[in-house]
Amino acid sequence: MKKGKLWTLAVLLIVSMVLAACSSGNGNGSEGETEGENAGESSGGSKTLVFGRGGDSVSLDPSRVTDGESMKVAANIFETLINFGEQDTTLQPGLAKEWEASEDGLTYTLQLEEGVKFHDGTDFNAEAVVKNFERWANGDADTFPYYQSMFGGFKGDEGHVIESVTADSDYTVVFQLKRPQAPFLKNLAMTMFGIGSPEAFEADSDGFGENPVGTGPFKFVEWKRNDSITIEKNEEYWKEGLPKLDRVVFRSIPDNGARLNALITGDIDLADGINPSDQATIGDDENLQLFERPSLNIGYLGLTVTREPFGDKLVRQAFNHAIDKQAIIDAFFEGAAEPAKNPIPPSIPAYNDSIEGYEYDPEKAKELLAEAGYPDGFEMELWAMPVPRPYMPDGAKVAEVIQKNLADIGVIAEIVSYEWATYLEKASKGEADAFLLGWTGDNGDADNFIYALLDGDNIGSNNYTYYDNAELHEILIQAQTEVDEDTRNELYAKAQEIIHDDAPWVPLAHSTPLLAGSADITGFKAHPTGSDILSNVDFN
Amino acid sequence: MLQYIGKRLLQLIPVLLGMTFIVFMIIRAIPGNPAQVILGQQASPEAVASLEAKLGLDQPWYTQYFEFLAGILTGDLGESLRTRAPVAQEIWPYLAATIELAVFAMIIAIIIGVNAGIISAWFQNSWFDYAAMVVALIGVSMPIFWLGLMEQWIFGIELNMLPTTGREEVRNPVNAITGLYVIDTIIQGRFDQLGEVIRHLILPGIALATIPMAIIARMTRSSMLEVMRSDFVRTARSKGQRMSLVVYKHALKNAIIPVLTVIGLQMGILLGGAILTETIFGWPGIGRYIYDAIGFRDYPVIQSGILVVAFFFVMINLLVDILYSVVDPRIKYD
């Protein structure tokens, strides 16, 4: 009896497999073919882009989360008042068509686009903007973490930068600040401050992340957790002729190799997180093309200044001379990076190019070590990142090169590693001698790198080296409120000189993260922040 | 029988309770702070502290533990720290994805494994026997991630026969009802989608089936060898009965008990331990759900996720024990 059932099941299974294999002999997955075969009726539209990436989103309400995978989807559902440039972080019109700052940098007046509607049919206007900012300002660190980081706190907090947000007319919004904040407009351009439909979030603020309603080129359709998120064309989109695609499906495929396989077989059309070592494979395949994401990151070796002997500037400078950055880049970034000499990438206007990087010179390094009182070197721990990140594709391998470089100058480094959350926690407590780490910028502003990573205020948070320089601190605080762009850049130029001399890091590389897509994709431009707006993307 | 089941169910309570306690202590012993992970690298220490308080993470461990237990008793598995969704509601789609894959893999493993074991035993020391056992040995020791990537390369890229990732053709998505797509597509009469769903099951199914298949084959072989030396099989063979009749009617029934045990254990392992397969094939299952939760220190998800998997594990073993008496009437539970 039982046996009989088993066999029936087996036969059924085999029959259905054969049927299945026969019914869909789709070719190499180039768009038109797969669609015509079996997808036609249900997906309706003809142009579906499948975007493969490493992880799922956490929430589609971007103001509630901090992860890049959430932003990647939200950037296509929501629009910000001000946009970043296509492939840089310059300020461009968004939902606000123009804006004006007062002399003292305390008042910003924004003129909004007229005739824009949210996906639920309600009107976008100044009142909606005010309601969005009120929602955030009345929140707390738990609900809106980024608002706190970028605007200094919430309503009633002393650090809160925004005094008031008011609607002057239907399409004029006025931001009144308590004190000047230089990166204010750049903050407004961040995906997390995309404007949502007040009607939707007032009805269900907690559920907004599952049913996001914005003004963007695509509308939310469906979310299968850890699997796929589907968005479809917003037919009422206010920009003429956009978006060009009918649907976009974001698929999570955690393994980089498997994601590339899926791209080659045509299961997906575009893949994020391509290993630098796979560049050649993609270059040789005429069905594929490679995209570079402009660098907005830094990968570095941090030297914890509170741990001996790294309290000595000479030792830190010696390390800067000892490490062969170019060799690391050639071997593990496969050239998809440039050597770093400053803590900010060159795409940021405040980058100080007049600084001479420490050249690779083991002899010089040995001299500096001897001068510091360590002619025979010393023993230390070298922490290697356990996870690949765009700024550090393979922490363990990079650490091995550094270990060899250090051995050349007599320093014995033992490589250690911890699981990622543990690694960050221990490093933030200053438990590492020297550690590999990096940073990807949020808004393309120098403050978001230098102050966040190297100011004394951020010890225990993102300043893992415990480096604290009073002169630098003063400059950075001044730069935060300096409204004149040139004066501000001069301040950052000076800050970079101080950091260069004190050398709390060995800056290693600014990488250009790689993506790959099928050859017939047009109009895709990878954005340095990682939030790619897909309204111009099309298939040939 | 009912009494026996009742007794076994009662025994589950201390097992599951002990398990929750161990998991609870272990995940709190590892460093890393959920509040910090949720708020991201940008967050200030004050923000982290206030979130800890809000999540109740500043409470002593025993308070947290008893709150967790009290929640479970009322059917509340807690709320994910990361997504803020109730775990009880969030967990089902993942569990369904894993069940579908595990059942599919187990069917492959049983059909091939049991039959390979039988043939090996029947033709003991033949070339087939040796070949099958060498293959089984390789199967047991095969690294799954390598096998998975090789499958993708051969069947996906080189032969272009099968899809390499996911559960469905995303350009023609399945409308989920139960979360078990094979059933969902049949209910909705979408046989085009059923074909796609099965095609997506094949490669991860084979990867996942490899190890249990090998174990089942070896267990079936050794168990069959023993039974075939017994008198009743010799009698049956000497009567000149066909091999299939001897094996499936007489011998297998007596040899299947240890195989059933192995199948039960392997099924439990497949439910909880398919992380590698799920990662390689982009399969949104429960293994990855819990694994990701560990990275994010999402305590409620880890605790409740493991509890659910453990529950299924012990239930499957109970089911196997009950099956013993169905297969072999000599076994009675009184």
Image (tube, coloured by chain):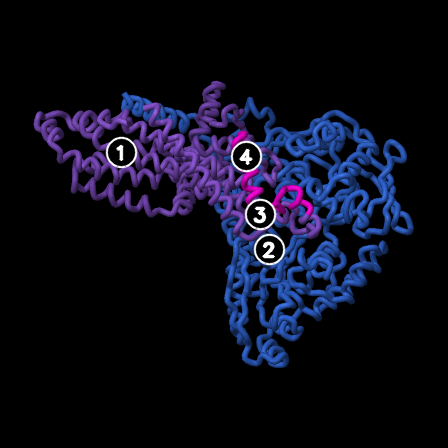
Chain colours: A blue, B purple
Kindly identify the amino acid type of the residue bearing the numbered disc 2.
Glu
Mark 4 = which residue?
Answer: B70
Image depth: mark 2 or mark 4 in front: 4
Q: Characterize the local packing of mark 3: few (<14), some (14-19) or many (20 or more) Cα atoms within 10 angstroms.
A: some
> Is the residue at mark 2 from the same chain as the one at mark 4?
no
Using the numbered discs, state the Cα–Cα distance from disc 3 to disc 1 in whole angstroms.
Answer: 48 Å
Badge 2 element: helix
Mark 1 = which residue?
Answer: B114
Using the numbered discs, state the Cα–Cα distance from disc 4 to disc 3 in whole angstroms.
Answer: 53 Å
- Name the N-terminal-most of marks 3 and 2: 3
Mark 2 = which residue?
Answer: A425
Decide: marks 1, 4 in contact (CB < 8 A)?
Answer: no
- Label 3: chain? A
* Span colored in magenta: B50-75
Badge 3 element: strand
- Label 1: chain? B
Residue B149 is covered by the magenta coloring: no
Badge 4 element: helix
> Is the residue at mark 1 from the same chain as the one at mark 4?
yes
- Name the N-terminal-most of marks 1 and 4: 4
If the image is split into quadrants, where does the C terminus of chain A sit? top right
Using the numbered discs, state the Cα–Cα distance from disc 3 to disc 2 in whole angstroms.
Answer: 36 Å
In this rendering, position of residue B160 left or right of residue A529: left
On the image, the x and y values in percent for residue A140 come to: 73, 42
Q: Residue at x 55, y 30 (%)?
A: B89
On the image, the x and y values in percent for residue A283 come to: 53, 49
Q: Is A427 located above or below residue B63 in the figure?
A: below
Residue A166 falls in image quadrant: top right
